[in-house]
Amino acid sequence: MQLPNKNEIKNLKNYYPVGCKIVLDYMDDQQAPPTGTIGEVTCIDDAGTIHVRWENGSGLGLIPGTDQFHKIQ
């Protein structure tokens, strides 16, 4: 897995700012929240992981390009 560069991280942070709401469409992980779970972005780290506080209490992060999710406008 190749880490995103600084410009890609900046774009992620602009598109998914802290506090924005997202919906999980698919995550291949036994610990994943159910499909359709809504969460709030808490931060994006230097590896490009989008950290989320899910409505079910989970804190599992999203990996862009691997996990499927969308932002609530």
Image: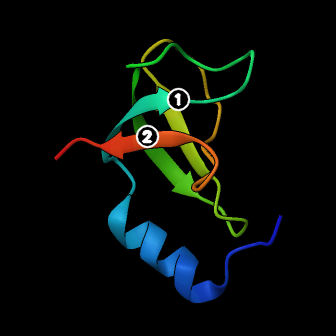
Q: Are marks 1 and 2 in contact (CB under 8 Å)?
A: yes
Circle on res. 26: 1
| Circle 2: element type | strand
The local secondary structure at tag 1 comes to: strand
Q: Is residue 64 left or right of residue 14?
A: right
Q: Amino acid under label 2?
A: Phe
Instruction: Report x, y in % for residue 50.
Output: 56, 51
Number of the label disc, if any, that sits on residue 48: none
The residue positioned 53% from the left and 29% from the top of the image is 26
Q: How many marks?
A: 2
Residue that appears at 65% across and 62% down: 45
Label 1 amino acid? Tyr
Q: Is residue 73 above or below residue 35?
A: below
Within 10 Å of the Cα at label 1, are there few (<14), some (14-19), or many (20+) other Cα atoms?
some
Image height of 71 relative to 57, above or below: below
Asked if 37 appears above or below 65 in the picture, the reply is: above
Residue 40: % across, % down = 39, 37
Identified at 73% across, 65% down, the residue is 47
Q: Pick the residue in front: 33 or 59.
A: 33
User: Which residue reaches farthest right?
Assistant: 1
The residue most toward the left is: 73
Disc assigned to residue 69:
2
Q: Give left or right: position of 26 versus 71.
A: right
What's the CA distance linking mark 1 and mark 2?
A: 7 Å
Q: Residues within 10 Å of mark 2 (few under 14, many from 20)?
A: many
Name which quarter of the figure residue 57 lies in.
top right
Query: Which quadrant would residue 41 be assigned to in this image?
Result: top left
> Residue shown at 83%/64% (left/top)?
1
Q: Nearer the viewer, residue 63 or 28?
A: 28
Indicate the position of residue 18 as horizontal and vertical percent values: 39, 54
Give left or right: position of 42 versus 18: right
